[in-house]
Amino acid sequence: MSLTNDSERRVYHTVTNVPILWLEKGESLQLASEILLEEVENTNTPRSKMELGHKIVDPAYLLAGYALENFFKGIGIGKGIYEVDKENKFTGASHKLINIAKKIEFKLSKEETELLERLTIVIVWAGRYISPKGPIFLSDDIDAIESGSWNESWEKKSIPLLRALYKRAHDELETLCCSR
């Protein structure tokens, strides 16, 4: 990010170190994801579901992954684990949701870990591009894809799991915001 003057840098630094703003952005992304996922869930005919699902499932999960990433990073900011430094670099974070969850000590079940692996694939490339940006992503991602992560039965169990993760992450971040 290229900020042009000291005033912009100070504002960016201040704003990005406020957990409640991460909460609000996460809530917006969660809401948008939920709207898309509900549309897929409420579509009745297999043909319509396939056509609709193909077009909006990846964007729905992309928004879901971004929502969780914002909740997790907000928790990290609130706990003092992460910060945006004076050069406006987000210290120690990435888009790898499992790594962020571990760093902020957010406990995950095996199923939640699998969901975060899949959402990370969507965040990094599958929700935005037709193929990974390079071979470094593809090797790990093929294992997840081949393990059945991209099928309708996974989708049915992932949506309730995602909603439970949203609630836990949201509630933890909200508690941190209220205690400041």
Image (spheres, rainbow, N blue to C red):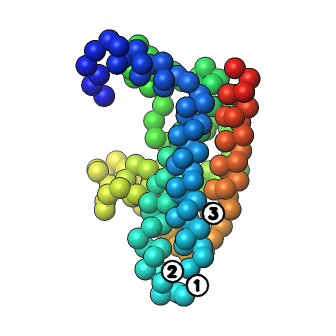
Tell me the amino acid under the disc marked 2: Lys
Q: Going 67% across and 28% down the picture, which residue do you hit? A: 177
What is the distance, in whole Å, between disc 3 and disc 1 at their CAs?
Answer: 17 Å
Disc nearer the start of the sequence (2/1)? 1
68 or 7: which is nearer to us? 7
Quadrant holding the N terminus: top left
Q: Which residue is mark 3?
A: 159
Mark drawn on residue 85: none
**Residue 85, visible in the rendered structure:** yes
Horizontal relation, residue 101 to residue 168: left or right? left
Classify 10 Å Cα crowding around label 1: few (below 14), some (14-19), many (20 and above).
few
What is the distance, in whole Å, between disc 2 and disc 1 at their CAs?
Answer: 7 Å
Tell me the amino acid under the disc marked 1: Asn
Above or below, 47 against 179 in this view is: below
Disc nearer the start of the sequence (3/1)? 1
77 or 103: which is nearer to us? 77
Q: Position of residue 131 (x, y in %)?
A: 31, 59
Q: Which residue is mark 2?
A: 49
